[in-house]
Image: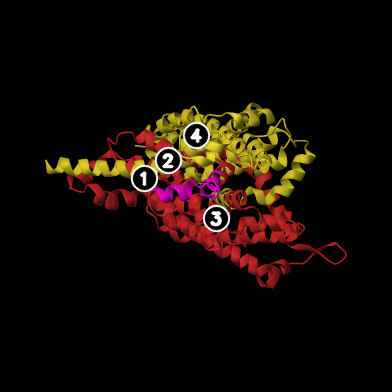
Chain colours: A red, B yellow
Amino acid sequence: MAQRKPVRWHIVVFLAPAVLVYTALMIVPLFGTLNLSLFNLDETKTRLFVGLANFATLFGDPRWSGAFWNALANNAWFFLVHMLVQNPVGILLAALLSSPRLRFSAFYRTAIFIPTILSFVIVGFVWKLILSPIWGIAPGMLDAVGLKSLFAPWLGKEEYALTTLALISVWQFVGIPMMLIYAALLSIPDEVIEAAEMDGVTGWSQFWKIKLPLILPSIGIISILTFVGNFNAFDLIYVAQGALAGPNFATDILGTFLYRTFFGFQLQLGDPHMGATIATAMFGIILVGVCFYLFAIQTRLRRYQF
Amino acid sequence: MSQARHSTARTFGAHAILITYTVIALFPVFVTVINSFKSRKAIFADPLALPGPATFDLVGYQTVLKQGDFFQYFLNSMSVTVVSLFFVLMFGAMAAFALSEYRFRGNLLMGLYLALGIMIPIRLGTVAILQMMVASGLVNTLTALILVYTAQGLPLAVFILSEFMRNVSADLKNAGRIDGLSEYTIFFRLVLPLVRPAMATVAVFTLIPIWNDLWFPLILAPSEATKTITLGSQVFIGQFVTNWNAVLAALSLAIVPVLVLYLIFSRQLIRGITAGAVK
């Protein structure tokens, strides 16, 4: 008895419900998919274990690899736009909102978060209508400030469509970094801020030198959530541009590529095995990014306990 | 004196930026809602004008309400979201507490195992989930959606909540232990109230994707009795692409309930966040 610690049942009780639901509905089906990526059909339509041959096809066979690398590059750009626009804007808004004695801050916070609560169906359609040359809201507004020549059917041009969609997505989701950073800023104790003020550190230098280091863990969480969210994105592009991710696949990202392959489109039949292969590749990409964050970044962040 | 003027200028600047962004955030919603009350001609003639006596027209709403049972869709969405949210917060907080509080063999591994779910969209397992639901007779029930959404929400909830729970002072919990509180009491009475701001945040993050999901309602519960509002409006918009009145009205009908729900909930949310219990 002396050498064995008693089982601490409360740990089991705390963990069991989450682990059970999660395993049954997420991990088990996922392994079904990973498993599927190792099989394919031969000429006689019998299922055959092919090992990693599907991946060789995906990365090397010109019929597949062109679409795959295109989707991956588009996806990387999509993510970059979010990191460069969404997160700085979110942090800026949160920093402004959290300044003490700011009037109407509840109103701003509520209003800015509204796009985030809307579904992709709504967001995709509303922006399609607004940017539509037929309805003419966007050209009309540009005309009012004398910039009509700048208008183009952005969603229809190969060179603009992806950036436009990324910005629409930024518009929709900026509320999330804002809220997380806002909560983090509020949890900084008043004493820390007061001590800074006593030392004459106020305004922007206070933000850069005192608050920013304290909210770095939250910024880390946001970055990784953005990464994962972007590499899983699908709905907005599907609603706005359809499964073909037009024009000419310029907005094709991994999610839409997976969907087309898995469920088929127009004359192409769905291919569950190649679909599962793409899903597994996506899983790998995301896994690499998350491991990089967990081991290279998170371990170096300093955590403060108040 | 100059100090005061300086801070006035700064306040003004802050308001200017916030107002600008608020306008950007609300403009598309505003345009959709006002145009849904106008006649077809007025929608195209002057999209930015408010509906006046000459242009006021409810034809879009009449078309929409003839077509589908939006109230039923709304109730379905509501029950699925609320029940899933409860399970995610409850189970998520419990698991997060176990991971952040106790040292036991496999702790890190369990944390990674649960965090895996943040990285993978649950959609990748759709085929297997569908087979499972067919086998257990749960297709076209709201229970199927609740189960899937609970599993979907848990990883992020555990991840965020354990980040926050690590910051809860260890002295406080140990003081509770010395006073003879059980681990369950420490969790429910001491720790849960302290992470309320984080819970509110997690609630919002969990709620939004559930409410807006199109994929699982379409695959697991597409029957008329179990349609969610997102699926309902998607189907509707698909049928009426060229009827701008109907599309705008359907969009407005899909926006308004969420908006009301959010405005009610945001008071709780703000109270939760500003309770500042972590201080």
Q: In this view, does B239 lie above or below A207?
A: above
Q: How far apart are marks 3 and 1 (CA)?
A: 28 Å
Question: Can you tell which quarter of the image residue B215 is in?
Answer: top right
Structural distance between the alpha carbons of marks 1 and 4: 28 Å
Please name the residue that numbered disc 3 is placed on. Answer: A155
What residue type is disc 2 on? Answer: Ile
Chain letter of mark 3 equals A
Callout 2 crowding tier (Cα within 10 Å): few <14, some 14–19, many ≥20: many
Q: Which mark is residue B228?
A: none
- Marks 1 and 2, the one that precedes in the sequence: 1
Judged by depth in the image, the label closer to the viewer, 3 or 1, is 3
Query: Is residue B197 among what the camera can see?
Result: yes
State if disc 2 and disc 1 touch (CB < 8 Å).
Answer: yes
The residues bearing labels 1 and 2 have C-alpha atoms spaced at a distance of 9 Å
Task: Kindly state the secondary structure of the residue where label 4 is placed.
Answer: helix
In the picture, which quadrant includes the C terminus of chain A?
top left
Seen in the picture, residue B273 relative to A265 is either above or below; the reply is above
Please tell me in which quadrant of the rendered image residue B39 appears. Answer: top right
The three-letter code of the residue at mark 1 reads Leu
Query: Could you tell me if the residues under marks 1 and 4 are in contact, i.e. CB atoms within 8 Å?
Result: no
Residue pointed to by mark 2: A112
Q: Amino acid type of disc 3? A: Leu
Residue B119, position in %: x, y? 57, 53
Return the residue at label 4: B34
Q: Local crowd at mark 3 within 10 Å, few (<14), some, or many (≥20)?
A: many
Magenta-tinted stretch = A126-144
